[in-house]
Image (cartoon, grey):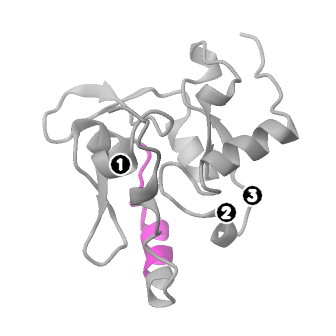
Amino acid sequence: MAGKARVSRLLRERVARAAGDRCGYCRTPESIAGFRLSIEHIIPASKGGKTTPENLWLACHACNEFKGSRTHGRDAVTGKRVRLWNPRRQRWLDHFSWSEDGTEILGLTPRGRATVATLQLNRSELVAARSLWVQVGWWPPRGDSAESASRTT
């Protein structure tokens, strides 16, 4: 297996700007994460994914690790194996919503539910952090509805 191609500073900046400087999956902004977010291959390099803008997105370390080389997950409602949500091609609000208190991500579709489960988007430490972020008015993130309408479902 060939190694991943290096992501240039300019490409990283382009991807980060397109991602709104936040994790494409758990939505944690880099500004409150306490660390720099990673560039993630939506289709993993190990599965033939290219290091091109169309296949890259921003992810926190935990989401990136839980996703790993996975492209599919299991929907707990249907029991079927489905593709994970693609932040480049699909609108977040079509597949997810926030719990009433703003601390948990709810999967609305098979892809959404499989992504929540596979990437553990409601891991206890993240829910606890979101609870604090809600208290200080940083959460839930604004702008999910302003995502590009050009993405397809």
Q: Amino acid at mark 1?
A: Val
| Image: 97 above or below 150 | below
Quick one: label 1, few (<14), some, or many (20+) residues within 10 Å?
A: many
Secondary element at tag 1: helix
Q: Amino acid at mark 2?
A: Glu
Q: Quadrant of the N terminus?
A: top right
Tag 3 near tag 1, CB within 8 Å: no
Q: Position of residue 9 (x, y in %)?
A: 86, 41
**Which residue position is annotated with label 1?**
116
**Which residue position is annotated with label 2?**
30
**Which residue position is annotated with label 3?**
36
- Is 132 situated left or right of 98 in this image? right
Q: Position of residue 80 (x, y in %)?
A: 20, 27
Q: Amino acid at mark 3?
A: Arg
Q: Which mark sits nearer the N-terminus, 1 or 2? A: 2
- Is 39 situated left or right of 86 in this image? right
Tag 2 near tag 3, CB within 8 Å: yes
Viewer-nearest of labels 1 and 2?
A: 2
Q: Position of residue 32 (x, y in %)?
A: 64, 72
- Given residues 132 and 1, the one toward you in this image is 132
Residues under labels 2 and 3: Cα distance? 6 Å
In percent of the image, x 64 and y 50: which residue is there? 61
Question: Which secondary structure class fits the magenta region best?
Answer: helix
- Given residues 70 and 93, the one toward you in this image is 93
Q: Which mark sits nearer the N-terminus, 3 or 1? A: 3
In percent of the image, x 20 and y 41: which residue is there? 76
Q: Which residues are magenta?
A: 119-131
